[in-house]
């Protein structure tokens, strides 16, 4: 057992060691810290979306950066009945524990003017997988807004900026197609006059024509009614639920014709025709 004198002698002995021994011990301590840092990286030690900001002038933990999402449409204006591609790319820093999962949300938006309020509460959800780079072919039947939602993990997600795809209604008169390439109501131009022999005075107005032949086309009905000089035919037996419409009163533009598909024929069973309806609001007071 060492006495107090022995302990004092040991201390003095240590003081007699070479002066560079302290430097050797300090170097050994630095090497040990460096090895521990290699074995336990900051990204592995931190939970999702949490990183380490080092001292001023040091490196910034990439796991603090929000993944970058690019979302676009190949064409933002298409004729009714055609399709376009939605394209996305997601850039996320590696080694941060992200578990990516992509979903496309869509809803009708008839009024595509800047700053227009949401006019339909009718969302569709499409799971598009886990690949950070991909595309989805869509064929909207009416003006539609799309949003890409990227799940980063169980409790974290980010969303892209919304993109719009406008749907042009078809022209009823094929002669109008010789002069114009849009479905907006236009008077036939000189090109039609030259091709048909009509004079400007008797050249008919270009009209759109839309046939509603499915129960999920209520937004197309509203879009067609808002488009001047449009003939809207709603087939017999079609039932259109207008409850999700948020735009207030439905506007009927100048020159619009709304035609029901019911035909009364002697000796044939009664046809009730199409039905347009809204569901009662359970929260509304009498």
Image (spheres, rainbow, N blue to C red):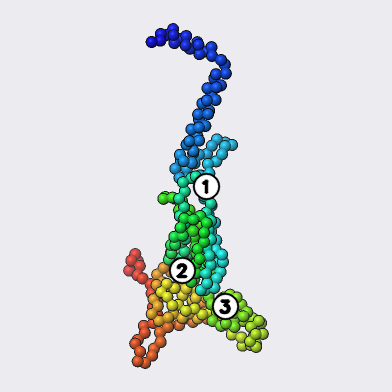
Q: Give the labeled residue for mark 3.
A: 185
Q: CA distance from mark 1 to mark 2?
A: 42 Å
Q: CA distance from mark 1 to mark 3?
A: 50 Å
Badge 2 element? loop
Residue drawn 49% across the image and 38% down it: 41
Q: Which mark is residue 264?
A: none
Badge 1 element? loop
Q: Position of residue 76 (x, y in %)?
A: 56, 66
Q: Assess disc 2: are there few (<14), some (14-19) or many (≥20) residues with their C-alpha within 10 Å of its C-alpha.
A: some
Residue drawn 52% across the image and 50% down it: 92
Q: Give the labeled residue for mark 1.
A: 93
- Quadrant where the image shows the N terminus: top left
Q: Mark 3 or mark 1, which is nearer the start of the sequence?
A: 1
Q: Position of residue 159 (x, y in %)?
A: 49, 55
Q: Mark 2 or mark 1, which is nearer the start of the sequence?
A: 1
Do the numbered discs 1 and 3 sit on residues whose CB atoms are within 8 Å?
no
Nearer to me, 191 or 286: 191
Front tag of 1 and 2: 1
Q: Which mark is residue 247?
A: 2
Q: Mark 2 or mark 3, which is nearer the start of the sequence?
A: 3
Q: CA distance from mark 3 to mark 2?
A: 23 Å
Q: Assess disc 3: are there few (<14), some (14-19) or many (≥20) residues with their C-alpha within 10 Å of its C-alpha.
A: some
Do the numbered discs 3 and 2 sit on residues whose CB atoms are within 8 Å?
no
């Amino acid at each position: 057992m060492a006495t107090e004198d022995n302990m004092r002698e040991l201390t003095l002995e240590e003081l007699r060691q070479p002066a560079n021994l302290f430097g050797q011990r300090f170097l050994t301590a630095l090497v040990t810290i460096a090895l521990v840092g290699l074995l336990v990286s900051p990204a592995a030690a931190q939970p999702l979306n949490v990183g380490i900001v080092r001292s001023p002038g040091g490196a910034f933990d990439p796991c603090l950066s929000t993944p970058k999402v690019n979302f676009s449409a190949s064409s933002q204006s298409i004729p009714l009945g055609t399709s376009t591609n939605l394209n996305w790319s997601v850039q996320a820093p590696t080694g941060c524990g992200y578990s990516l999962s992509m979903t496309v949300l869509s809803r009708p938006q008839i009024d595509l003017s800047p700053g227009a309020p949401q006019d339909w509460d009718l969302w569709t959800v499409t799971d598009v997988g886990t690949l950070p780079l991909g595309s989805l072919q869509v064929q909207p039947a009416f003006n539609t807004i799309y949003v890409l939602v990227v799940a980063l993990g169980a409790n974290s997600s980010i969303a892209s900026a919304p993109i719009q795809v406008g749907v042009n209604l078809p022209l009823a008169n094929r002669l109008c197609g010789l002069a114009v390439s849009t479905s907006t109501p236009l008077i036939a131009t000189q090109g039609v006059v030259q091709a048909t022999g009509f004079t400007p005075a008797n050249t008919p107005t270009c009209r759109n024509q839309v046939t509603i032949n499915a129960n999920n086309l209520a937004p197309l009905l509203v879009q067609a009614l808002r488009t001047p000089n449009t003939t809207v035919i709603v087939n017999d037996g079609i039932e259109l639920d207008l409850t999700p419409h948020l735009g207030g009163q439905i506007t009927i533009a100048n020159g619009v014709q709304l035609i029901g598909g019911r035909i009364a024929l002697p000796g044939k069973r009664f046809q009730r025709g199409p039905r347009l309806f809204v569901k009662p609001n359970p929260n509304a007071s009498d």
